[in-house]
Amino acid sequence: MKKILLLLLLIFSGLIYSADLRNFEIIIGGSNPETAGAPIPVTIRAFDTDGNLKTDYSGIAGFREEGSGQIIVDETGTTLTQAFTNGVWEGKIKILRADMPVTIILEDASGATGTVIKNIIPGPYSKLKLIIDGMTFAPGTLTGHTGTWITQTTGALTPAYVTVYACDAYYNTVNANLPTVRVYSIPQSIVTPSYVNFSIESISNTIFSVALVPNPDQSGSYPITAEDMANSLIKDTVSVYFASLSDFYIWAEAPAFVTAGQNFTVSVKVSHFPPPNTSYVAGFSDAVRICAIDTYGNSTTIPALLPDASPIQSCINGEANFEVSYTWAGQIRIQPDNGGSTDYSNKDNPNRWSNVINILPAAPDSFTFTSNKQELTKGKTAILTATVFDQYLNPVSNTAVNFIILTGSGTLSAASVNTNSIGVAEVIYTAPSINILNVIQATVSALSQSKTVEIVSVKSDKLEIWPNPFNPLKGPAKINFPLDENCKVKIEIFNMFGQKLWSIEKDANKGGCDIDWDGKTKDGNTIGVGLYVVKVSYTDSAGSHAISKKMAVIK
């Protein structure tokens, strides 16, 4: 009985266990050898780690070959199969590269693989492929090459070299029915040899020398064509940029980040080729100059370079290096220009400008501290603003500013604030419910400097001035304010720049105080038209108090 139970358990466990995918078996049909690009039937089976067909596999796998050619699945037009059914996929593939043999690899996302080999021969001759410097011949692909051309130069003494291949439809080289090939270009060129008979030479590729000699000699994109002389429909054309050695291009290079006031290097390059490149003109020694421009190319909207706004220097082998500095924080570029007799092909082209240079503020050097209000009633607020600058008056960000109430009372919204992107740190001051002079201090630790502002807080606006506005030529202004007790008071008149024009001190009685002011300064001069501030200060048993009010003067 125990043996029967054990047997049933083993059978049941086998039914519910699904082993992992291990590998693929590829069964490939078709002729042997098969022609490149011909549809070949294949059957693929997925096997698990136990060596059994993995019937629950429904994934998608991808083909590649061990060389550099391509394999295309007929049903999808890509390298991928369709989804497997019950662990099996059947379809057709096209192997584009000819080789004896080609190793075909199949793999899926889990890493399971399968391989098979197949002998593939080229198809019939049907295409030419032209390859120039910068391009790599890629047989068995849809394009026939990788990479792209590199710039060549015009002139009989500086030819370009091209290789022409006789190919089948998928750029495999062929050795039968070979063509006679010529190479030509527009405009005029000197081509050596003038043509090649591949059949007589028993070759599938050859090299031509192409010296482009346009008249006039100028840079540009010029087509080079390889053509079957017996069938002009079989040809391959590549358009290549040729730079004339009579053309000169100029451009500038600079660091991306610079601190205001610090020296940095600007390099000016001169080449026969458009920028950027690393082929500078050997022996070129003409002078070049530079200037600072904004990111739109304007030089008049921003400060100039230092120590010279437009320095000039002679090149050495097509390169000149300038040591300059700049004190305005922001974004600039460097514009190079002719400092000698050379006529640059890109003299009006922004491609000669340098990269954007980000000028960063220097270290903190000074700051200002202001309040948007000088007098507040109970519970009202003022914005206190500290702005930190470097030595060139650029705002400095991310700098800590500490705030405290030195004398008086009230509340601050924060004790410490870092400056923002424009160098500003702000706090909100809320006034107390008493008449008092409040002094708030801001300190920038990085500078070991402090500044203060004064704000007068009042129970209510009890200071009265009549008439207001007043005309000194028509009589004095009467200044009146109430007092809770006898005390000594001080009345001061200031202009809007904070300059004290007149003051008086006197003993005043409880209840109120009246002062007449004739509109003259302490020197006896009549004040002019404008706004003025009347400030009243006094000390009683409750402490020191100050109230103020603006007064307008007319004539």
Image (tube, rainbow, N blue to C red):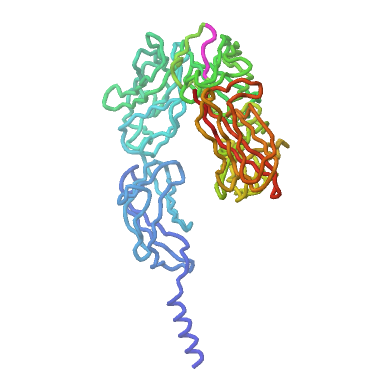
Q: Magenta: predominant secondary structure element?
A: strand
Residue 510 visible here: yes
Q: Which percent across, then down, holds residue 174?
A: 36, 33
Q: Going by the image, does 328 lie left or right of 36?
A: right
Q: Residue at x 42, y 46 (%)?
A: 102
Q: Going by the image, does 444 lie left or right of 54?
A: right
Q: Which percent across, then down, holds residue 361?
A: 62, 31
Camera-side residue of 288 and 68: 288
On whether residue 338 falls in the magenta region, the answer is yes
In the picture as drawn, the residue positioned furthest to the right comes out as 448
Q: Going by the image, does 349 lie left or right of 389?
A: left
Q: Which residues are magenta?
A: 335-340
Q: Residue at x 49, y 20 (%)?
A: 352
Q: Which percent across, then down, holds residue 294?
A: 50, 24
Q: Is 227 placed above or below 37 here?
A: above
Residue 354 visible here: no
On whether residue 520 falls in the magenta region, the answer is no
Q: Which percent across, then down, holds residue 292?
A: 54, 20
Q: Is 409 placed above or below 219 here?
A: below
Q: Is 141 placed above or below 79 here?
A: above
Camera-side residue of 187 and 514: 514
